[in-house]
Structures are given as structure tokens and as C-alpha cells.
Image (spheres, rainbow, N blue to C red):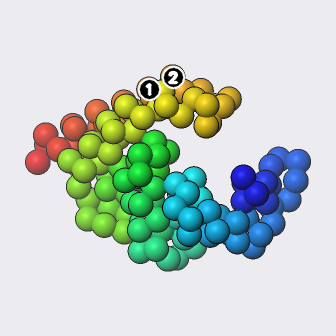
């Protein structure tokens, strides 16, 4: 949570170094939220391999947002080969997990997230069937 606070909001300026520090501590303890946030940071800041590794770990632990991102990595070939089957699998896995995250991710529009994931899964299946 401290990492999220330090990332900033529309009303506050981000303190990236402090956010990364706290996300790293969370990731080191196996926290999937910290792993995902740190993984996204590394993906955007030229350490793709480290980013993929962190997101994979969070996805495998059952964290739906990481599963969605991991699916995106396979769909787009970011840090790995394009693999529409794996993208589809991770998208559908994330869809199944979303109801369990209402308490953890309050305020998010879960039906909209689920709808978006279903569209991504359909697109991955479509691409898979074109091969």
C-alpha cells in the first residue's frame, strides 16, 4: 500500500524511488500486488526479462490483474514469443479470479474488467484459429 501511495494520484506528485522501494519489499515477500507493480515498472523501464519474471510469479499465485497482464505479454510477444494459446489461457484464468478480488480491489468496475477480458480472450482465440 505504501508503494501505491508513493506512486501518487491526480492530486499528488509521484515519488517513484520510494514507490519502487516499497514495491520491491512487497515483491521480495511474495506479495503479488508488489510483484505486479514492480513488474510493470520494469517492463516500462527497459528490464523486460525482470518484468516478465515478476508478472509471471504474481500470475501463477492466482492474482487476476497479473494474469491479465501475463496474457497481454503472450498476446503481444513482449518479453516472450507470441503465443495466443497461452494468452487465451491466462485471460480466461483471470476471468475466473475476478469475483475473488472485489474485496481487494474495491471501487473497480468488475463487470467492465470482465467484459474487457472476455474480448481479449475472444481475440486470442480468433488469432489462434487463424493459424
Image point 39% across, 39% down: which residue?
Answer: 94
Residue reaching furthest to the front: 29
Across and down, in percent, residue 34 comes to 59, 59
Q: Is residue 63 left or right of residue 16?
A: left
Decide if residue 46 is on the left or right side of residue 16: left
Task: Give the residue pinned by disc 2.
Answer: 111
Q: Is residue 6 left or right of residue 59?
A: right
Expressed as whole percent of the image width and height from the top left, the position of residue 57 reads 41, 60
Q: Callout 1: 10 Å neighbours few (<14), some, many (20+)?
A: few
Question: CA–CA distance between discs 2 and 1?
Answer: 6 Å
Q: Residue furthest top?
A: 111
Residue at x-position 29% and y-position 48% = 87
Name the image quarter holding residue 126: top left
Q: Secondary structure at mark 2?
A: helix
Q: Residues within 10 Å of mark 2 (few under 14, many from 20)?
A: few
Tell me whether the residue at label 2 lies in contact with that at label 1, contact meaning CB atoms closer than 8 angstroms.
yes
Vertical placement of 6 versus 92: above or below? below
Tell me which corner region of the image, top left, top right, bottom left or bottom right, holds residue 97: top left
Residue 26 in picture, x, y percent from top left: 62, 63
Residue hosting label 1: 115
Compared with 40, 75 (above or below) is above
Amino acid at each position: 500500500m505504501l508503494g501505491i501511495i508513493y506512486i501518487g494520484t491526480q492530486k499528488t506528485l509521484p515519488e517513484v524511488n520510494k514507490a519502487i522501494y516499497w514495491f520491491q519489499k512487497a515483491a521480495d515477500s511474495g506479495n503479488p500486488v508488489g510483484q505486479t507493480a514492480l513488474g510493470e515498472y520494469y517492463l516500462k523501464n527497459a528490464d523486460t526479462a525482470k518484468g516478465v519474471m515478476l508478472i509471471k510469479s504474481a500470475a501463477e499465485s492466482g492474482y487476476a490483474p497479473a494474469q491479465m497482464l501475463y496474457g497481454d505479454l503472450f498476446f503481444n510477444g513482449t518479453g516472450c514469443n507470441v503465443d495466443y494459446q497461452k494468452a487465451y489461457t491466462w485471460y480466461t484464468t483471470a476471468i475466473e479470479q475476478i469475483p475473488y478480488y472485489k474485496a481487494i480491489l474495491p471501487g473497480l468496475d468488475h463487470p467492465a474488467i470482465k467484459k474487457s477480458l472476455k474480448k481479449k480472450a475472444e481475440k486470442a482465440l480468433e488469432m489462434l484459429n487463424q493459424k
